[in-house]
Image: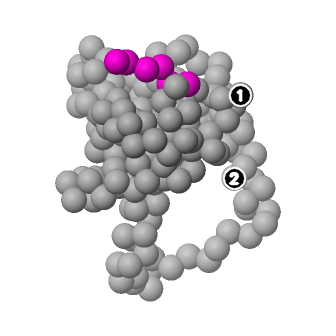
Amino acid sequence: MVINNDALIEQLQQREQAGLEEFSRRFTPLMRYIISPILPDEQDREECLADVSLLVWEQIERYDPNRGAFTTWLTVLTRNTALNRVRKRKETEPISSDQLSPAPGPEEQVLRRELLEDLRRALENLPVKDQILFHRKYYYLQPIAQIAAEMGMTARAVEGRLYRLKKHLRKELGGAAR
């Protein structure tokens, strides 16, 4: 029997094993799709997948349907878990003296937040296909070949469109986009 997301969420909140099994069956492919470009190592991907499943089980009460769809919440949770794994791995690697940089000060933090907000607004004004392209490349860190195959484009077309997109955003943001 196929249950809808609301019923699935209720099962997870009630800590029903059937809900966890249905969650895994239904959402593991999506989570793998998000994790794969971020974590190249298969063992890291599997551990991350387990971490996300555990987080969903433990934190399902944090999901607020008024803030967005369940898949959106899961997507963000999955991406952030994978990126945190990458950060932790980098933290355990030896650091050379040329890699050290001072922590950003309060002014720089404010400027970064403002730039991110300007970028978000600039992205909202783009055609939907360009927004999707941007998010797939720079938010989900997907490779050009994957984006091209899944969007029905050539790799050169994706590269060219991303180049023009970055150029447009740089102009919109007053040269601040990198």
Residue drawn where x is 37% and y is 70% of the image: 89
Residue drawn where x is 74% and y is 70% of the image: 105
Tell me residue 113's x, y (percent).
72, 49
Looking at the picture, the colour scheme in use is one colour
Tell me residue 92's x, y (percent).
38, 79
Q: Amino acid under label 2?
A: Arg
> Taking 137 as reference, is 149 left or right?
left
Eye-nearest disc, 2 or 1: 1
Most foreground residue, 167 or 112: 112
Q: In the image as oriented, which residue stretches furthest toward the left?
A: 42
Residue drawn where x is 22% and y is 59% of the image: 43
Most foreground residue, 16 or 31: 16
Question: Eyeballing the image, is 11 above or below 50?
Answer: above
According to the image, label 2 marks what residue? Answer: 112
Tell me residue 95's x, y (percent).
40, 82
Q: Which residues are magenta?
A: 1-6
Residue 26 picture quarter? top left
Question: Eyeballing the image, is 87 above or below 32?
Answer: below
According to the image, label 1 marks what residue? Answer: 66
Most foreground residue, 1 or 106: 1
> Taking 119 as reference, is 148 left or right?
left
Residue 152 appears in the figure = yes
Is 3 one of the magenta-colored residues? Answer: yes
- Considering the whole magenta stretch, tell me its main secondary structure: loop
Label 2 vs label 1: CA separation? 28 Å
Crowd band around label 1 with a 10 angstrom C-alpha radius: few (<14), some (14–19), many (20+)? few
In the rendered view of the protein, which quadrant contains the C terminus? Answer: top right
Crowd band around label 2 with a 10 angstrom C-alpha radius: few (<14), some (14–19), many (20+)? few
Q: Secondary structure at mark 2?
A: helix
Q: Secondary structure at mark 1?
A: loop
